[in-house]
Amino acid sequence: MDQPSIDPHFPNEPQRPAEPKESEPPPRRGLAGVFNEKLALWGSANLLGSWALGYLILLIADSIASDIEEAYLFGLPGIFIFMVLRFTTPFLAPLFAFLALASLSSDVPERKRNAIIALVLSIATVIPNVAYF
């Protein structure tokens, strides 16, 4: 039984454990797992998309303003979206920018790339707020 096996499917050498992949970033613990560049990226993208949606709704309401009920149907949600964005953007955009800045010092290239994109989007989120008001 102690003789070496000739079958190539059963090697005699013990198998080494697989080396960990370097592409996977190390897991984060605590609040760093929540408040990171992905939150900044998704939050900035949602804020910017909300501004685009608000402008689109007001554009549609302006184009169908022939009837007052139709204008109210589209205009009131647009005004409500702008009121909410007017008060939340000055607080959320800097929060997302600071989260992105904190992730720029990461050694993982994927996190650094997401942080750069989140920083650009959070700066772009402030532009509609300043331009409209």
Image (cartoon, grey):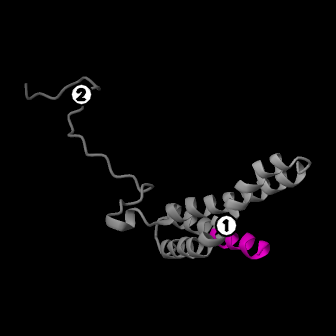
Q: Quadrant of the N terminus?
A: top left
- Determine which residue is flagged by label 1: 83
Within 10 Å of disc 2 (Cα), the crowding (few <14, some 14-19, many 20+) is few
Upstream in the sequence, badge 1 or badge 2? Answer: 2
Q: Give the range drawn in magenta.
A: 122-133
Q: Where is residue 46 in the image (x, y as percent from the top left)?
A: 61, 58
Tag 1, which secondary structure?
helix
> As rendered, which of 30 and 17 lies closer to the eye?
30
Instruction: Look at 47% across and 65% down and name the residue there.
Output: 108
Task: Tally the numbered discs.
Answer: 2
Of circles 1 and 2, the one toward us is: 1
Instruction: Look at 81% across and 47% down and name the residue there.
Output: 69
The reply, left or right, for residue 20 in relation to residue 111 is left
> As rendered, which of 74 and 72 lies closer to the eye?
72
Residue kind at label 2, given as amino acid type: Phe
- Determine which residue is flagged by label 2: 10
Q: Is residue 23 above or below residue 113?
A: above
Quarter holding residue 125: bottom right
Instruction: Look at 50% across and 72% down and name the residue there.
Output: 99
Within 10 Å of disc 1 (Cα), the crowding (few <14, some 14-19, many 20+) is few
The reply, left or right, for residue 69 in relation to residue 25 is right
Residue kind at label 1, given as amino acid type: Met
Residue 42 lies within the magenta run: no
Residue 125 lies within the magenta run: yes
The reply, left or right, for residue 22 in relation to residue 76 is left
Instruction: Look at 46% across and 70% down and name the residue there.
Output: 107
Tag 2, which secondary structure?
loop
Q: Where is residue 82 in the image (x, y as percent from the top left)?
A: 70, 64
**Alpha carbon of mark 1 to alpha carbon of mark 2: how far?**
70 Å
Quarter holding residue 33: bottom left
Report the predominant secondary structure element of the magenta stretch. helix
